[in-house]
Amino acid sequence: MLQTIVSGLESGSWFALLGLAIVVVMKAADVPNFAMAEMGLVATYVGISLAAAGVPFWIAVLATLITGAVIGVLIDIALMRRLSSYGHFPLLLMTIGLTLALNAVVGLIWGHDPRSFPAPWTGAAVQIGGGVAIGVSQIVSIIVGLIGAVAITAFFRTQVGAQMRAVAENRSTARLIGVSAGRLSAIAWAVGGFIAAVTVMLQAQSALVSTLSPASLIIYGFVAATMGGFTSLLGTFVGGLALGVIQQFVGAYISSAVQFSVALLVVFLVLILRPEGFTKGMVLRDV
């Protein structure tokens, strides 16, 4: 059971981090980004290629994170701002189109074979006792997830974070008091891309990733964001962890074939019972 819980916290950390990336962009840019997992996949494949070429691990990690942030900024400046005046629906369609485009780019450049991003601790384990071994990669994912949640929370307590909250509350009023929505949007997309790169990179250190991986990861990330009402960092993080643990228990004691169905059931229940999320939620409106 302990191994199942740890495995759930590991995958839950991935879901929570991606959910937080989605929430960060929602707070500043008011866009539900369906391409977040693909952004992380492209960045991770860059790191994998560098590592395979003999580049030191930590330099490859740094390159991965920078690539994720740069992809986010480029998407915002080149695409999202040009469509922002047309309303939310074109922006939503653009993120869906980006999902397909970025996935195709990965397939064209690197192929569709699963790959990993080996870390110095890959394969190492800590013996707990009673025949239970906890992988160091699992511990790293959980710790990075916690650090990421704390860091993002701290970020939103800074002046820039406060401005993002102001934009999220009332974009028009924020502009009147001199807040640059465009600058904050670029920062949010950069932070979102950075977190997405961290997420997929962690996943690639524990498992194989491919062009098929983002499809399920983005859904789990959106489930986590839904549990936080798309605005609550705490609700998103806790929701992601809970989803990971539930998923692992379902796979271990019921069937792995229904794990994905359970995630969809969680979304359905949250939308029915608590559409605003488990903490303060977003204001529902027509788009």
Image: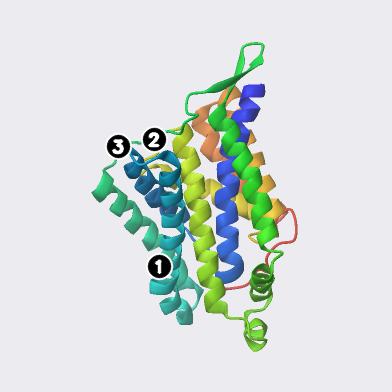
Kindly identify the residue that appears in the image at 45 percent across and 77 percent down.
81
The mark that comes first in sequence, 3 or 1, is 1
Q: Which residue is mark 3?
A: 113
Query: Which SS class for mark 1?
Result: helix
Callout 2 secondary element: loop
Indicate the quadrant containing the C terminus: top left, top right, bottom left or bottom right.
Answer: bottom right
Q: Which amino acid, mark 1?
A: Leu
Image-based side of 287 in relation to 48, left or right: right
Amino acid type shown at disc 2? Ser
Q: Which residue is mark 1?
A: 74
At which x and y percent is residue 244? 60, 37
Q: Earlier in the sequence, mark 2 or mark 1?
A: 1
Q: What residue is rendered at 46% in x and 67% in y?
A: 92
Residue 11: % across, % down: 56, 37
User: Gap between marks 3 and 1, in whole Å?
Assistant: 27 Å
Up/down of 262 relative to 77, above or below: above
Q: Are marks 3 and 2 in contact (CB under 8 Å)?
A: no
- Give the quarter of the image for residue 144: top right
The picture places residue 185, in percent across and down from the top left corner, at 53, 71
Residue type at numbered disc 3: Asp
Vertical arrangement, residue 177 with respect to residue 230, above or below: below
Neighbour class for label 1 at 10 Å: few (<14), some, many (≥20)? Answer: some
Rendering coords of residue 136 (x, y %): 56, 28
Colouring method of the image? rainbow
Q: CA distance from mark 3 to mark 2?
A: 10 Å
**Badge 2: few (under 14), some or many (20 or more) residues near its Cα, within 10 Å?**
some
Q: Nearer the viewer, mark 3 or mark 2?
A: 2
Query: Could you classify mark 3 by the number of other residues whose Cα lies within 10 Å: few (under 14), some (14-19), or many (20 or more)?
Result: few
The N terminus is located in which quarter?
top right
- Residue 184: in sight, yes or no? yes
Which dot marks residue 116? 2
- Give me the residue at 63% from left, 29% from top: 6
